[in-house]
Image: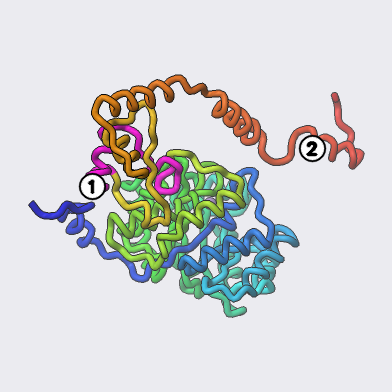
Amino acid sequence: MSEPALVENFHRETVRERTFAQPIVLWDETLRDGEQTPGVHFSPEEKLRIAELLSDVGIPLLNAGIPVVSEEEARAVRLLAEAGLRAKVLAAARTVPGDVEAVIRSGATHIAIFVAASNVHLRYKLKMSQEEVLNASLAAVGQAKAAGLHVAFVTEDTVRAPLDFVERLYRAVQEAGADRLVISDTVGIMTPLTFRWFLREFRRRVRPKDWSVHCHNDFGLAVANTLTALEEGVNSPHVCVNGLGERAGNTSLEELVMALESLYGVPTGIQTNRLFELSRLVEEVSGVPLAANKALVGYNSFSHEAGIHTHGILANTLTYEPLQPESLGRSRQMILGKHTGKAAVVEKLKERHATATDPLLAELLKRIKERSEQRGKVEVDKFLLTYRSLYEHPGISDAEFWQMVRGLGIATEGT
Ligand code: MN
């Protein structure tokens, strides 16, 4: 019998049939879409801390923000642009001259010019016709190119837009000099199957030289859809640390990177053994706690309690772990509890060079199980209540809002 492997040969062969773009230019959105997570705000200094680590681990391109949002935001983009990071710094702009001008002034070398493309966005949000969107886009791309910027052209809600319009718009901006074309699944409604169809149609009609996808996780499919895009030759996927972002978030940086490295065997240029450190930093600075069962960086991802599982892990970690925790810069945890088996206890005793007879082992096991079954849930209940009260009302409270309104002398009815 040959040595066991994580993936069998059929798997590697299947992947090899695909042509992956190289290099893959990971485009980080943690500081822009990630910051748009409800209740999240990064100061310029916090953005710099995250950007420095992103750049150190090997992220080649990062969106610093939208300078026209506020003076603080403009300061943040400038701070990052002037920090001498290895990563290229990008800033975003609507198809409005003032927005593009703000990016030019920020010192960022890359710009993402965005406008909506679908009928629902054009009619109800922008109140613009397709012609107006096209003309504004061409003007903005021209303005940014004239200033020497690397231009990415983004439409929101691309996948729900009429394909003929998508074709006309993207071909026009590409001819006008846009360097990279970005397709967005703004409301996260693609599946690997439908996205594959869309991307093939886009490639056939537009012939992009350099293209990106921006996926949302409303149905938990952001990483799967982004992998599909890479299988179709997309070279610059958008990612966010811990899958932060609007609503259910964006494609998780760590999940995408590890899937590419471990399951596809495609190099990403990322120091994966620092991904846990990056995840922790973003958890702290964003204040968005990771779900315990979050893939790869969640607390449980490398913890084992059940007897059958710990027994297998102790014999060979490949039995129940798809990758080694060290590859992400973390370690494995053996949990002693209700489901613990003999092997884990024997292993634990070894820490202090102890051995026990079978009857003593059985008694020790019985006591561990009893202790964990008796353990109350007071602490975890307290934590959950605090967590819920924080997350059910993030941002400015109602009381604070109405106090501001009264302070400005705005007349209201009721109390
Ligand atoms: Mn988004």
Beta carbon of the mark 2 residue lies under 8 A of ligand 1: no
Residue 62 in magenta? Answer: no
Q: In this view, does 218 lie to the left or right of 378?
A: left
Q: Please tell me whether mark 1 sits on a helix, a strand or a loop.
A: loop
Determine crowd level at label 1: few under 14, some 14-19, many 20+ residues with C-alpha closer than 10 A: few
Determine crowd level at label 2: few under 14, some 14-19, many 20+ residues with C-alpha closer than 10 A: few
Over which residues does the magenta segment extend?
A: 294-320
Provide the residue designation for mark 2: 401
Classify the position of the C terminus by image quarter: top right
Which residue sits at x=48%, y=63%?
27
Which residue sits at x=26%, y=65%?
19
Q: Position of residue 401 (x, y in %)?
A: 79, 37
Q: Where is residue 374 in the image (x, y as percent from the top left)?
A: 46, 19
Which residue sits at x=61%, y=53%?
128
Q: Position of residue 367 (x, y in %)?
A: 38, 23
Residue 311 in magenta? Answer: yes
Q: In which quarter of the image is residue 20?
A: bottom left
Between marks 2 and 1 in the image, the one whose residue lies nearer the viewer = 1
